[in-house]
Every structure is written in structure tokens, then in C-alpha cells.
Amino acid sequence: MSTNNETITQAFVQQFADGYIMAAQQKESRLQATVSNYGDVTGSSFTANNMGATEANDVTSRLSDTVWNDNPNDTRVALMQDKDWSTPIDKYDLPKLKANPQGTYMQNGLAALNRKKDAVIYQSLIGTSITRAGEALPYGSIALPSSQKILDGGVGMTKAKLITAKKLFRKNEADEQNGEDLYMLYDAEMLEDILSDTTLTSADFMAVQMLQDGKLSGHWLGFTWVPYEALATSGTVKTTCAYAKSSTQFGIGLNRDIDIGPRRDKRNAIQIYIGESYGAVRTDEKKVVTIDYQF
């Protein structure tokens, strides 16, 4: 004969989750704050005007003719890119759920859009920039020159590559001596290479602190290190980049339009919709260095 002690467990109440835990993912934009803010944009594109360096003249005689100096300039064009994210919630499902997914769904969508924003900025750094020489002239393009690219050399990330990158910024007068903020993108493979390199981590106090913390975030070797796991990959080679904040302009056309409401054509399902529009363009090749490495 069963006893109360044996049957009482059948009446135990099961505690169901009353919330959702988002899967591991990058949630915030990490790159937007590392480039220049162009501001609000009206139209399908925006332009950034560059003024090149010029040289002063030697005056070798009195009362001689004035010599005019040419001021080289070019115009870069950023095309606006429209991005959105949307998902439905069936109204018939809501009474059956203890946890209302609406807030977490929106957070998930915002995280996806932030990663997309970073992808646009990253591609503008390493890719081809659109140029325009005049109002009536067609668009042109300019790629990052080979002089600004450090090849993989069949090895991973090394001290020599980092030193070469820093050297290029100094050579181009594009470092902290001219008030530039320099950034370096890194991912898990770079982190492993750097923390395993005793020539980088044996002497410098910050390097020792990095080993203790197991991260690169912060200022080191003249760069602010920014974690980014979506680096371009070709076979066994990845491409990261170091850059000055002023190297790239980022403009916003539509700043996060969020709409949550019923869809009449879907039996009043609740639709969460988020839309954005923005663009980015590299304005100075001397302020960007790409670094390839094996992984």
C-alpha cells in the first residue's frame, strides 16, 4: 500500500523559467566609438573632404613674385546602408508561456544590428573607398596600398608585425604625436599568439598584467585593443587592422527605428521591428594598417 510519503511528490509544483537567457554573443557595437562621428545624414550618401599636405616655399630674392601653393584634396563618398531585424510573436503562444519573450527578443535584435554595424565599419577600414574628384566626374575607388599591408609570412601574430605597424603610423605622422587615437582589433587567435610570446610578455608591466587577467583590453604598445571575432578569413589567414580614429567617418541616416505592434495580416501577431541606416568610409589610407596572420 502506498503511503503519503510516496505519493506527495506527485503534487510537487515544477518551477518553470520566467525569463530567457541570451546565448553567448557580442551585444554592443565595439567599433562605432573608435572611428569619427560624421553625425546625422540626409540622403543616400555623404561625403568627406580631405586636404593633403603641402610644402612651404623658400624666398630667395626681395620683391619677387608670389608663388601660390597647391593644396591637394579629394572627396570620399560613403553610401548609406539600410539594415533591419524583425521577428513575430504569435498572440496565441503568449498565454501558454510563463516567460514573455518580447524584451529578450528585442535585445537579441539590437545585438544583431550592432554586430552588423561593426561589420560595415570593419569593411570600410580594410576595403575599397569610393572617391569623387568633381561634381561632374564619375566615382572612382582607392584600395589600401601594399605599403600599408603587413603580410602573414606563414606565421601567426608576432612582435615584429606589431612593431612594424607602429612604425608605419610614426612614419606617416599618424600617431599619438599628432594627437591621434590608435586602435588595434584582435580575436581569440591573436590573443593566444600574443600571450604565448614571451618576448612580448616578459618585461612590460602591462604585459604581465595581461597574463594575469588573460585579456588584451586596454592601452598597450600605443594601441587601444578592441576585441572583434569577425575578422576576415581566407583559408588559414586572418586579417586584422590597426587604425587611427580619424581614418574613417561614420554617419547615421536612420538612428534605430523601433516598432512593436500587431500585424493585422498575421492574425494580430505581435511584430518586433528594428531598422537602421548608416554608412562608413575610410578617408586616409596612411592611417590604416592591415595585418595578416596564420591561425
Image: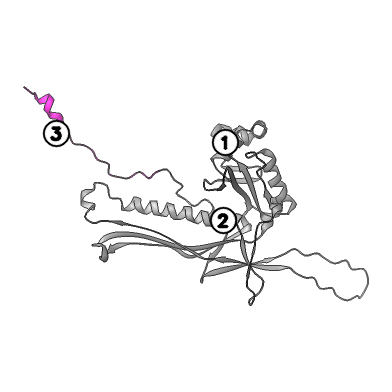
Say left or right for 181 vs 114: right
Say left or right for 198 vs 54: left
Q: Which residue is mark 3?
A: 11
**Closest to the observer, 84 or 146:** 146
The x, y position of residue 223, in whole percent, is 63, 46
In terms of secondary structure, where does tag 3 sit? helix
Neighbours of disc 1 within 10 Å: few (<14), some (14-19), many (20+): some
Q: Which residue is mark 2?
A: 123
Residue type, label 3: Ala
- Tags 3 and 2 in contact by the CB under 8 Å rule? no
Gap between marks 1 and 3, in whole Å? Answer: 52 Å
Where is 281 relative to 135, above or below? above
The residue at the far top in this view is 1
In terms of secondary structure, where does tag 1 sit? helix
Residue type, label 2: Gln
Where is 82 relative to 194, above or below? below
Name which of mark 1 and mark 2 comes first in the sequence: 2
Which of the two discs, 1 and 3, sits closer to the camera? 1
Gap between marks 1 and 2, in whole Å? Answer: 24 Å
Gap between marks 3 and 2, in whole Å? Answer: 58 Å
Residue type, label 1: Glu
Neighbours of disc 3 within 10 Å: few (<14), some (14-19), many (20+): few
Say left or right for 264 vs 175: left
- Say whether residue 119 is magenta: no
The residue at the far left in this view is 1
Residue located at (42% from left, 60% from top): 84
Q: Which residue is mark 1?
A: 192
Q: Which residues are drawn in magenta?
A: 1-23
Main SS of residues in magenta? loop
The residue at the far front in this view is 235
Name which of mark 3 and mark 2 comes first in the sequence: 3
